[in-house]
Image (cartoon, rainbow, N blue to C red):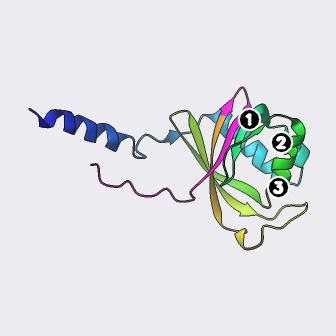
Amino acid sequence: MRRLPWIAVALVAFAGCGGADRPAAPDAEQVIRGWADTLRSGDVEGAAGFFALPSVVANGTPEVVLRTRAQARSFNAALPCGARLLRTTSSAGFTTAVFRLTERPGPGTCGRGTGMTARTTFVIRDGKIREWRRVADEPSAPGPVV
Protein backbone atom coordinates (compact mmCIF):
# COMPACT_ATOMS: atom_id res chain seq x y z
CA MET A 1 0.00 0.00 0.00
CA ARG A 2 2.93 2.36 0.62
CA ARG A 3 3.76 2.26 -3.12
CA LEU A 4 0.46 3.82 -4.15
CA PRO A 5 1.49 7.46 -3.45
CA TRP A 6 4.74 6.98 -5.44
CA ILE A 7 2.85 5.46 -8.34
CA ALA A 8 0.46 8.42 -8.34
CA VAL A 9 3.42 10.87 -8.33
CA ALA A 10 5.07 8.96 -11.17
CA LEU A 11 1.89 9.01 -13.26
CA VAL A 12 1.38 12.75 -12.72
CA ALA A 13 5.03 13.45 -13.60
CA PHE A 14 4.84 11.29 -16.72
CA ALA A 15 1.61 12.97 -17.86
CA GLY A 16 3.35 16.37 -17.68
CA CYS A 17 6.25 15.32 -19.90
CA GLY A 18 5.07 16.55 -23.27
CA GLY A 19 2.12 14.22 -23.50
CA ALA A 20 -0.38 17.01 -22.89
CA ASP A 21 0.42 19.02 -26.03
CA ARG A 22 -2.57 19.62 -28.25
CA PRO A 23 -3.27 21.73 -31.32
CA ALA A 24 -3.09 25.46 -30.68
CA ALA A 25 -6.24 27.54 -30.58
CA PRO A 26 -6.84 28.98 -34.07
CA ASP A 27 -6.89 32.57 -32.77
CA ALA A 28 -3.50 32.14 -31.04
CA GLU A 29 -2.01 30.58 -34.17
CA GLN A 30 -3.42 33.42 -36.27
CA VAL A 31 -1.73 36.05 -34.04
CA ILE A 32 1.60 34.20 -34.13
CA ARG A 33 1.44 33.72 -37.91
CA GLY A 34 0.49 37.36 -38.41
CA TRP A 35 3.38 38.55 -36.25
CA ALA A 36 5.91 36.28 -37.99
CA ASP A 37 4.71 37.19 -41.50
CA THR A 38 4.76 40.91 -40.66
CA LEU A 39 8.26 40.81 -39.22
CA ARG A 40 9.56 38.62 -42.06
CA SER A 41 8.37 41.27 -44.55
CA GLY A 42 10.49 43.85 -42.69
CA ASP A 43 7.58 45.72 -41.07
CA VAL A 44 9.02 46.20 -37.57
CA GLU A 45 6.37 48.77 -36.63
CA GLY A 46 3.59 46.37 -37.65
CA ALA A 47 5.24 43.48 -35.79
CA ALA A 48 5.46 45.61 -32.64
CA GLY A 49 1.70 46.18 -32.89
CA PHE A 50 1.11 42.49 -32.17
CA PHE A 51 2.49 42.95 -28.63
CA ALA A 52 0.34 43.91 -25.65
CA LEU A 53 1.64 46.62 -23.37
CA PRO A 54 3.04 45.59 -21.04
CA SER A 55 4.38 42.27 -22.31
CA VAL A 56 7.25 40.03 -21.28
CA VAL A 57 10.00 38.86 -23.64
CA ALA A 58 13.03 36.62 -23.12
CA ASN A 59 15.26 35.79 -26.07
CA GLY A 60 17.77 33.60 -24.25
CA THR A 61 18.07 36.43 -21.74
CA PRO A 62 16.45 37.29 -18.44
CA GLU A 63 12.88 38.54 -18.80
CA VAL A 64 12.41 42.04 -20.13
CA VAL A 65 9.12 43.89 -19.72
CA LEU A 66 8.09 45.93 -22.76
CA ARG A 67 6.10 48.88 -21.45
CA THR A 68 6.06 51.17 -24.48
CA ARG A 69 5.48 50.81 -28.21
CA ALA A 70 9.08 52.07 -28.73
CA GLN A 71 10.39 49.19 -26.60
CA ALA A 72 8.28 46.71 -28.60
CA ARG A 73 9.70 48.18 -31.84
CA SER A 74 13.25 47.92 -30.49
CA PHE A 75 12.73 44.29 -29.47
CA ASN A 76 11.39 43.34 -32.91
CA ALA A 77 14.09 45.33 -34.71
CA ALA A 78 16.77 43.48 -32.72
CA LEU A 79 15.61 40.08 -34.01
CA PRO A 80 18.06 39.41 -36.85
CA CYS A 81 15.97 36.76 -38.62
CA GLY A 82 12.55 36.57 -40.13
CA ALA A 83 10.58 33.38 -39.53
CA ARG A 84 8.02 31.23 -41.29
CA LEU A 85 5.60 29.45 -38.94
CA LEU A 86 5.75 25.67 -39.35
CA ARG A 87 3.49 24.41 -36.53
CA THR A 88 2.03 25.25 -33.15
CA THR A 89 0.97 23.28 -30.09
CA SER A 90 -0.60 24.33 -26.80
CA SER A 91 -0.14 23.15 -23.26
CA ALA A 92 -0.92 24.69 -19.87
CA GLY A 93 -1.90 28.09 -21.30
CA PHE A 94 1.18 28.43 -23.51
CA THR A 95 1.33 28.15 -27.29
CA THR A 96 4.65 26.92 -28.63
CA ALA A 97 5.54 27.73 -32.22
CA VAL A 98 8.21 26.15 -34.39
CA PHE A 99 9.62 28.47 -37.04
CA ARG A 100 11.95 28.13 -40.03
CA LEU A 101 14.34 31.10 -39.86
CA THR A 102 14.70 33.34 -42.91
CA GLU A 103 16.45 36.51 -43.93
CA ARG A 104 14.32 39.65 -43.70
CA PRO A 105 14.61 43.23 -44.89
CA GLY A 106 16.23 45.63 -42.46
CA PRO A 107 19.44 45.95 -40.56
CA GLY A 108 21.35 42.86 -39.57
CA THR A 109 21.39 39.46 -41.14
CA CYS A 110 20.22 36.02 -40.14
CA GLY A 111 23.46 34.57 -41.52
CA ARG A 112 24.06 30.94 -40.64
CA GLY A 113 20.71 30.81 -38.85
CA THR A 114 18.89 30.95 -42.20
CA GLY A 115 17.07 27.67 -42.75
CA MET A 116 17.42 26.53 -39.12
CA THR A 117 14.43 26.05 -36.85
CA ALA A 118 13.62 27.96 -33.68
CA ARG A 119 10.95 27.53 -31.00
CA THR A 120 9.20 30.26 -29.10
CA THR A 121 6.54 29.93 -26.43
CA PHE A 122 3.79 32.55 -26.38
CA VAL A 123 0.96 33.62 -24.16
CA ILE A 124 -1.73 35.18 -26.36
CA ARG A 125 -4.65 37.07 -24.79
CA ASP A 126 -7.20 39.31 -26.44
CA GLY A 127 -5.43 38.97 -29.79
CA LYS A 128 -2.07 40.25 -28.48
CA ILE A 129 1.24 38.68 -27.50
CA ARG A 130 1.51 38.93 -23.70
CA GLU A 131 4.59 36.71 -23.38
CA TRP A 132 7.29 35.80 -25.94
CA ARG A 133 9.97 33.39 -24.74
CA ARG A 134 12.60 31.67 -26.86
CA VAL A 135 12.88 28.03 -25.78
CA ALA A 136 15.20 25.19 -26.71
CA ASP A 137 14.76 24.21 -30.35
CA GLU A 138 14.36 20.55 -29.50
CA PRO A 139 12.88 19.84 -26.09
CA SER A 140 15.02 17.45 -24.12
CA ALA A 141 13.73 13.98 -23.51
CA PRO A 142 12.17 13.52 -20.09
CA GLY A 143 14.52 12.06 -17.55
CA PRO A 144 13.72 9.20 -15.23
CA VAL A 145 11.06 9.81 -12.65
CA VAL A 146 12.73 9.78 -9.25
Q: Amino acid at mark 1?
A: Ser
Query: Is 25 in front, or is 72?
Result: 72
Between the residue at mark 1 and the residue at mark 2, the CA separation in whole angstroms equals 9 Å
Cβ atoms at labels 1 and 2 below 8 Å apart = yes
The amino acid at mark 2 is Ala
Residue that numbered label 2 is attached to: 72
Residue 19 location, x and y as percent?
A: 40, 44
Q: Which residues are magenta?
A: 124-146
Q: Nearer the viewer, residue 106 or 24?
A: 106
Amino acid identity at mark 3:
Ala
Q: Residue furthest bottom?
A: 112
Task: Name, please, the residue furthest toward the front.
Answer: 62
Q: Is residue 132 magenta?
A: yes
Q: CA distance from mark 3 to mark 2?
A: 10 Å
Which element is circle 1 on?
Answer: strand
Residue at label 1?
55
Rendered residue at 77%/31% (across/down): 54
Residue that extends furthest to the left in the rendered view of this protein: 1
Q: Which residue was labeled with disc 3?
A: 78
Disc 3, SS: helix
